[in-house]
């Protein structure tokens, strides 16, 4: 669910509140991070993406897979997935939303279909520079598949990891 400004709402980091209350992942330019995504939702499959970053999936439900790169992924209820995220090589002067929202082919509105957001933020080496005020940095939002996008789900499951 997005508000009029295009920013995710009303949930940040899984709890109602302000953007400042969202989970923030701080990364260093050029470093690679392993993320473990766990879908703790009871009945919802979820799309997940990080704005302007590619994720390389290496594990699905504790089974190593041939690594494959995605802009967004699907994770089933109770499923885990490990992926690598490589930070940009230099400080990008921006913040990036990490978003998750349900996938469903049932009639929308029969469940909570909110988008949950966290923030990916780069550490800056020169704290005296004008961009060190993180509230002034532009924030980018990823494009997630539509809530009922069966083509996105088919493409993801047909990827090299499952084929």
Image (cartoon, rainbow, N blue to C red):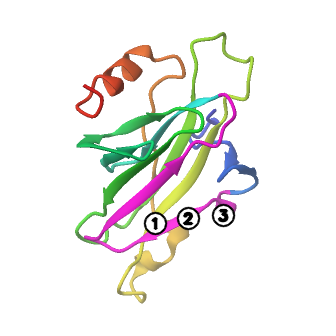
Which label sits in the foreground, 3 or 2?
2
Q: Which residue is mark 1?
A: 121
Q: Which residue is mark 2?
A: 24
Q: Quadrant of residue 7?
A: top right
Q: Position of residue 62 (x, y in %)?
A: 42, 47
Q: Earlier in the sequence, mark 2 or mark 1?
A: 2
- At x 63%, y 11%, the residue is 106
Q: Position of residue 126 (x, y in %)?
A: 36, 87
Asked if the magenta segment contains residue 36, the reply would be yes
Q: Are marks 2 and 1 in contact (CB under 8 Å)?
A: yes
Q: Which residue is mark 3?
A: 20
Q: Position of residue 101 (x, y in %)?
A: 57, 34
Q: Is residue 103 above or below residue 139?
A: above
Question: Bounds of the magenta span?
Answer: 19-43
Query: Marks 2 and 1, how far apart in space?
Result: 7 Å
The quadrant of the picture occupied by the C terminus is top left
Name the secondary structure under disc 1: strand
- At x 66%, y 42%, the residue is 9
- At x 54%, y 22%, the residue is 147
């Amino acid at each position: 669910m997005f508000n009029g400004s295009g920013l995710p709402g009303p949930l940040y980091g899984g709890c109602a509140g302000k953007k400042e209350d969202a989970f923030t992942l701080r990364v260093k330019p050029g470093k690679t991070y392993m993320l473990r995504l766990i879908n703790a939702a009871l009945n919802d499959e979820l799309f997940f993406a990080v704005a302007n970053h590619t994720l390389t999936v290496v594990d699905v439900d504790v089974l190593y897979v041939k690594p494959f790169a995605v802009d967004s992924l699907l994770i089933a209820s109770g499923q885990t997935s490990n992926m690598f995220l490589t930070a940009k090589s230099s400080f990008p002067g921006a913040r990036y939303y990490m978003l998750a929202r349900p996938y469903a082919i049932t009639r929308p509105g029969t469940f909570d279909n909110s988008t949950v957001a966290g923030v990916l933020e780069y550490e800056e080496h020169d704290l005296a520079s004008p961009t060190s005020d993180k509230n002034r940095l532009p924030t980018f939002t990823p494009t997630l598949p539509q809530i009922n996008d069966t083509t996105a789900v088919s493409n993801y499951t047909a990827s090299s990891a499952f084929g």
